[in-house]
Amino acid sequence: MAHMKRASAWITLLFLAPSLIGLVAFSVLPMAASLALGLTQWDGLSAVSFSTMREQWVGLGNYAALLGDSEFWRVLKNTCYFIVLYLPLILLASVFVALLLDSKRRLIGVYRVMYYIPVLSSWVAGALVWKWVLSPDYGMLNDLLGRIGIQGPGWLQDRSWAMPGIVLASVWKDMGYFGLILLGGLQGINPSYYESADIEGASWAQKAFRITLPLLSPAIFFVLIICVINSFQLFPQVMVMTATNGQPPGGPLGSTQVMVERIYTYAFKYYKMGFASAWSWLLFVIILFFTMLQLKLQKRWVNYEA
Amino acid sequence: MKPEDGSIRAAKPLSRSRAKRGAAAAVWYLVATSVALFALLPFFWMIGTSLKSRGALLAIPIQWIPEAPTFDAYRAVFALIPFGRAIVNSLIVAAATTLITLASSSMAAYAFAKLGTKATDRLFGLYLATMMIPMQVTVIPLFILLSKLRLIGTFGGLLLPSVFNAFAVFMLRQQFLSLPDAYIDAAVIDGAGQGRVFAQIVLPMCAPVIATLVVITFMGAWNDYFWPLVVLMDKAKMTLTLALNQLNGQYSTRYNTLMAGSLISMLPILALYASAQKYFQTGLQLGGIKG
């Protein structure tokens, strides 16, 4: 440390104290407790003590039950199905938005605000309007499709179209957010690259694939990492869009049950807190795995040279 | 920058390049407007629906613009559930969350940036590590802890965890690091205590990033769904997102009412965004890339 000693250790600790107490009480200890709970069958009712923990100890039983149960794999498959549809669409849409907004045309500020309004609304409001937009008979989307001669599907009421409907709403909601992040990346590209490309007579495609994409790759990589993490934690869309007429969310026929929805349901509807804790750790391991995988794969396509 | 770009083009015959540029502009506005339609049509649909009667909801062909607009849905949303109470609750919760987060995180960030030692640097690594843990991992023990403290179902329980916010500490620390040490050291030599240096020099110098964080935190708390869903059960304490969620559960086909409530819930954030837009743009990009 180069700087002079400005404060005693006590003063430093005083500044850190509120946040540090929070770190321990609301993050570190709960993490340890969650790991321990995941090894028990605790039902959320009996007292939390060492003796009840010992009585309800199942070791790795929860994990074995999860991995041996078809439900877990089905729900993981649903989550991955969401990601497979959502990732390419959100990447395309947000790159597209960023390219559009990287311009000095008149009204550009107005367009930027318009693209950002879905980001500002809460997921509950956004999901409610999409539930109604996707209504098969009375909704806006099928009406629009009908005008161009397409018979729209049953969307959220059809087990094979419910997830695509949720994906559509998610792309709509997130496009402006990631678009603006990528716009920051685009505007960080040194304009002299384009100038010399113009002088050498490079085509539009050459500029796009030789300059823009490589130099934007760190920002795209960041968006990709965040998107994958967020997708595994998909929750409010499912809870709001698929809960109808007193039916529990996740339908129809469980086709939109996803990881966090299950964790919430097991913990706070069935009070199987030990089981839900184990599930949440599996979720963490899966997220960690995919994040690490991307960090490893980035060397092949992310360009940090400029 | 674009001027050079223009001068290269100006070398070509003028009329051709002007026509080409006009066509390019037309295409740009056409495409940009189509994207804007995708972003905004659902809101247009939301507003239209909120002005419909219950009968008009199920009219075929559907009415894009209600034929007999009515404010019935706006009256209904306040009559069916304690919606006014929910607005007040959301205001209280979002304001208090912002205050607690900013106070605690800015103090910690200052200690990490300017008072730190090797030990605090290592501690900061722990902060960053916690950002990787999904909230679902800690939520169950947190729920148990708060119920032991009899804080489940109270605003206290909802607010208390916001005293720790690794993202806010991270963002503020990066900003504080860029402050010249000379300002702080000069004030210390003049006899100012660290409390005064922090409140009267450091915070005012970082006003833009603090304003950004205020907007991000307020918006996050206002729109939050998962944590209030876990902590609050009492109708009288519901925040707006929970009120809408309950409305969706009980009256899931009354879309005019649901849309009226959704629209009302968005207005404060839109107003906040409009008033802080300048900070917000740069701030979110900063928070995004560096977070």
Image (cartoon, coloured by chain):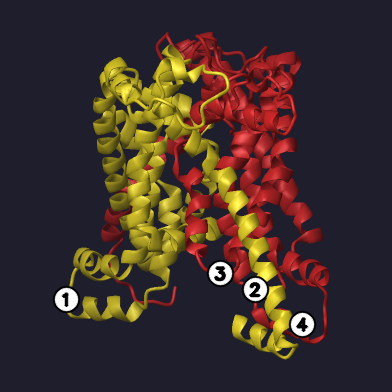
Q: Which amino acid does label 1 sit on?
A: Gly
**Cα distance between the residues tagged 2 and 4:** 15 Å
The chain to which mark 4 is attached is A
Residue under label 3: A105
Which residue in the protein does label 4 denote?
A198
* Marks 1 & 2 on one chain: no
The image quadrant where one finds the C terminus of chain A is bottom right
Protein chain holding label 2: A
Residue linked to disc 1: B191
The residue depicted at 26 percent of the width and 31 percent of the height is B89
**What letter labels the chain drawn in yellow?**
B
Q: How far apart are marks 3 and 4 (CA)?
A: 21 Å
Q: Where is residue B179 in the image (x, y as percent from the top left)?
A: 37, 74
Q: What residue type is labelled 3?
A: Arg
* First in residue order: circle 3 vs circle 4: 3
Residue at numbered disc 2: A189
User: Could you classify mark 2 by the number of other residues whose Cα lies within 10 Å: few (under 14), some (14-19), or many (20 or more)?
Assistant: some
> According to the rendering, which colour does chain A have?
red
Instruction: Please tell me whether residue A190 is drawn above or below residue A162 in the rendered image.
Output: below
